Amino acid sequence: MAFAVERRNDFMKNIGFIGMGNMGLPMAINLVKKGNMSVTGFDIAEDKRKIFEKNGGVQVSNTDSIINSCDVIFLCLPTNDLVRLTIQQIIDKGRKGIVIVDLSSTSPNLIREMYSKSKPAGIDLLDSPVSGGVSGATAGTLAIMCGGDINVFEKVEPLLHYIGKTVTYMGSSGCGSVTKLANNMIVGCNIGAVCEALAFAVKAGLDPTTFYNAIKDGFAASAVLDSKAPKIISRNFEASARIAVHQKDLINALELAKELNVEIPLSKIILDYMNEMAKDGKENEDHCAIAKVYEKRMGVEIK
């Protein structure tokens, strides 16, 4: 962390943050507290802005002051449409030299489109999606995967170390977003495997907690197993990562796979199950709630 503090002084001081939801809020707070800097934040939810202010941030009721005064603007937004709209607003209203750091899980094609629009305006754009969930965002231990110009990455890298443990430059614009899609393909398929195995074990007469304890230190061990199996067994589907967000990532992955003329069948199955949950109005539950689809198929309840 001393590395980040040392290099930050050579860079820009006015930091903005747009989108302080479940993930964005703890990241913005870490910038304030770990970076010991002034951060101006906006979210449409007033309660989020108040929490940010209580933690030392400067809250504003719209994005105009951030766009007009900040040198680095972080985005953490839930949809491609909001990312497109916000970046376009910065291009239209902002000034040359602004760096946009998009922490959202944004489509690679959209990022590349907005990169090509921001460049002529003298505005730099980095796609810098994150992985690690709310717990990682709170602890400042996220994995951050970045795409864009290497010189821009090197300037903002010290700031990223306040919110992430691992910060990796992946290549040109869109490469960070592609990395996040592949990451979430792994996470989604891993969740599906955990759900399927738990439902199968219960159907075969095993106690799910005993089953989990028996395998958690073996070759099936994973961060997904340890974080999601207890949630499923306890019927706690409060979202640390919403189905709707993961659903969007898998849709983006399937669109890119189509462009690349390849198939990703396992991810397609997981998306189908997430779509089924969304159809039932459960898209705001944790992504491990797709266990309910496996339960329905097998006629069991994992508990």
Image: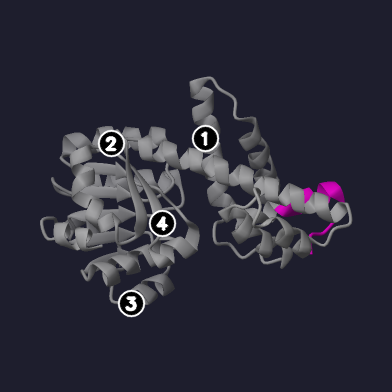
Give the camera-side residue of 223 and 214.
214
Question: Mark 2 sits on what residue?
Answer: 115
186 versus 287 height, above or below:
above
Could you say which quadrant of the image residue 69 lies in?
bottom left
Q: Are marks 2 and 1 in contact (CB under 8 Å)?
A: no
| Amino acid identity at mark 1 | Ala
Label 1 or label 4, whichever comes before in sequence order: 4
100 versus 59 height, above or below:
above
Tell us which disc is closer to us: 2 or 4. Answer: 4
Badge number at residue 253? 1
Q: Are marks 1 and 3 in contact (CB under 8 Å)?
A: no
Label 3 or label 2, whichever comes before in sequence order: 3
In whole angstroms, how far apart are the C-alphas of marks 1 and 4?
21 Å
Label 3 or label 4, whichever comes before in sequence order: 3
Q: Position of residue 186 (x, y in %)?
A: 56, 42
Give the camera-side residue of 58 and 64.
58
| Amino acid identity at mark 4 | Leu
Question: Mark 4 sits on what residue?
Answer: 142
Tell us which disc is closer to us: 2 or 1. Answer: 1
Relative to residue 212, is residue 117 drawn left or right?
A: left
Q: Position of residue 229 (x, y in %)?
A: 67, 59
- Residue numbers of the magenta segment: 291-303
Question: Mark 3 sits on what residue?
Answer: 55
Q: Are marks 3 and 2 in contact (CB under 8 Å)?
A: no
Could you say which quadrant of the image residue 174 lies in?
top left
In whole angstroms, how far apart are the C-alphas of marks 1 and 3?
36 Å
* Whether residue 252 can be seen here: yes
Helix, strand or loop for disc 2 = helix
Tell us which disc is closer to us: 3 or 4. Answer: 4
Q: Position of residue 220 (x, y in %)?
A: 66, 49
Label 1 or label 3, whichever comes before in sequence order: 3
The residue sitting at 38% across, 59% down in the picture is: 19
